[in-house]
Image (tube, grey):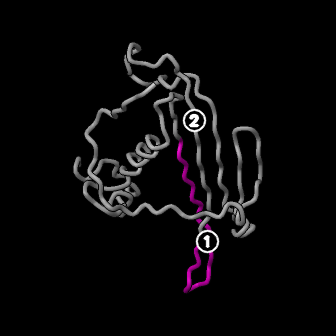
Amino acid sequence: MAYTTSWGFTPASELARQIKPANLAFGTDFAKTSYKPGEAILSNLTSPLDRVETYRFAVSQVANVYTGTKLDPSSQSQNKRGTAVLLQVRSDLGVTDTDTNSKIILPFEAHLVMRIPQHEAVTVDLVKAFLDRLYGGLYEDGSTTMNGRITALLHGSVLPQSLS
């Protein structure tokens, strides 16, 4: 079957933006900490023993991807199943006060969860385009850096500047 797809919103203009994923060396720098079907936790062997960086990958089945949406039942696919994908990283930042040589550790954690319908029209390119929309929320209108938006969010300002 052939499909055409449409997100239903005005496509965003493209800017050269600065998201630059780390080129992680899972095969050499990480070890499997735990594994069970649908979930793996990896530990970074290059991190200090008292603050090991971990990555968690998990996949689970979603019985009904329409749950929680307001989509009219007449427009829903007969196949309501989907897949949930989780990517989580935890890493601790060591900080040393160079004047007093005192040290503290700051815990960082981030995760990404995707719920994707299991439908033959869904392609990797569509999922990547959807992730690009998500990452777009880390920028202010027309900006090529995340600095302003992330600074605002860290200070509790959840609305983009253009809507404030």
Question: Residue placed at 42% from the left, 42% from the top?
Answer: 130
Occupied quadrant, residue 38: top right
Q: Which residue is mark 2?
A: 84
Q: CA distance from mark 2 to mark 1?
A: 33 Å
The disc at residue 13 is none
Q: Are marks 2 and 1 in contact (CB under 8 Å)?
A: no
Q: Is residue 58 left or right of residue 124?
A: right
Q: Secondary structure at mark 1?
A: strand
Mark 2 or 1: in front is 2
Q: Is residue 38 left or right of residue 101?
A: right
Please provide percent x and percent y for residue 135. 41, 51
Please provide percent x and percent y for residue 162. 22, 51
Please provide percent x and percent y for residue 63. 58, 23
Q: Which residue is mark 1?
A: 94
Question: Residue placed at 28% from the left, 47% from the top?
Answer: 12
The stretch of residues the image draws in magenta is: 94-113
Q: Amino acid at mark 1?
A: Gly
Q: Is residue 157 above or below residue 91?
A: above
Q: Amino acid at mark 2?
A: Ala
Please provide percent x and percent y for residue 117. 51, 30
Q: Secondary structure at mark 2?
A: strand
140 or 21, nearer to the observer: 21
Q: Residues within 10 Å of mark 1 (few under 14, many from 20)?
A: few
For marks 2 and 1, the one nearer the N-term is 2
54 or 65, nearer to the observer: 65
- Is-magenta flag for residue 130? no
Q: Is residue 59 above or below residue 104?
A: above
Question: Residue placed at 71% from the left, 61% from the top?
Answer: 27
Q: Is residue 11 above or below residue 115?
A: below
